[in-house]
Image: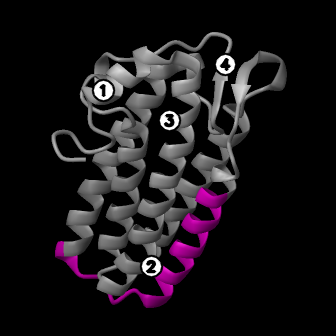
Amino acid sequence: MNKIVMLSLIFAFSEFLLMIVKHSKIQTSRSRNDKGSLILMWLVITIGFIGGFRLSEPVNQFWLGFGSGFLIVGVIIRWLAILQLGKSFTVDVAITETAYLKTDGLFKRIRHPSYLGLLMIITGFSAAMSSFFSFLVLVIPVFLAIIYRISVEEELLISEFGDRYIEYKANTKKIIPGIF
């Protein structure tokens, strides 16, 4: 379990650094409207991890392996999405001066691959905790927070890109290719 705790601390630190480095600046944003979704995400993830660890079971090698695989794939997807967005990526919901509607790469099939990656990371951690209850207190609330954040983000994207975003939205899934 110590390795899982250490990985979760590394994850938290990396997301904190991302928040500092990639937070939008007032002078370089065309529009911003986070509606508290960044704070909500941080609170839900933090509380979920605390609850998940408190409810975790002794390490089960199968679930540790499964969770580690999910976590690794999630990190790859999340960082590919962030890199593909480049300067357009911000941790808060904002449209930068250099932003454009990204519809290729990972964004060709799903509109929010960064959130897919985040959800996979969280699911990987909860699986490694080897407890159904850890899954309930970590994955479900984070999933709901992500859905809220996507609604906030899409509202801003529609106001910025209009019919182009509505058409893109009609032809892609939210976070899971071919499903949702």
Report the residue marked by disc 3: 154
* Residue 123 seen in the figure: yes
**Relative depth, front residue between 111 and 157:** 157
**Relative depth, front residue between 46 and 157:** 157
x%, y% of residue 90?
62, 31
**Amino acid identity at mark 1:** Leu
Marks 1 and 4, how far apart at CA: 20 Å
Q: Residue at x 37, y 79 (%)?
A: 136
* Residue 131 seen in the figure: no
**Amino acid identity at mark 4:** Thr
Q: Please tell me the numbered disc located at residue 137.
A: 2
Q: Please tell me the numbered disc located at residue 26.
A: none
Report the residue marked by disc 4: 96
Callout 4: SS: strand
Q: Nearer the viewer, mark 4 or mark 3?
A: 3
Marks 1 and 2, how far apart at CA: 29 Å
Q: Is residue 164 left or right of residue 110?
A: right
Report the residue marked by disc 1: 106
Give the position of the N terminus as an image quadrant. bottom left
Badge 1 density bin: few <14, some 14–19, many ≥20, Cα 10 Å: some
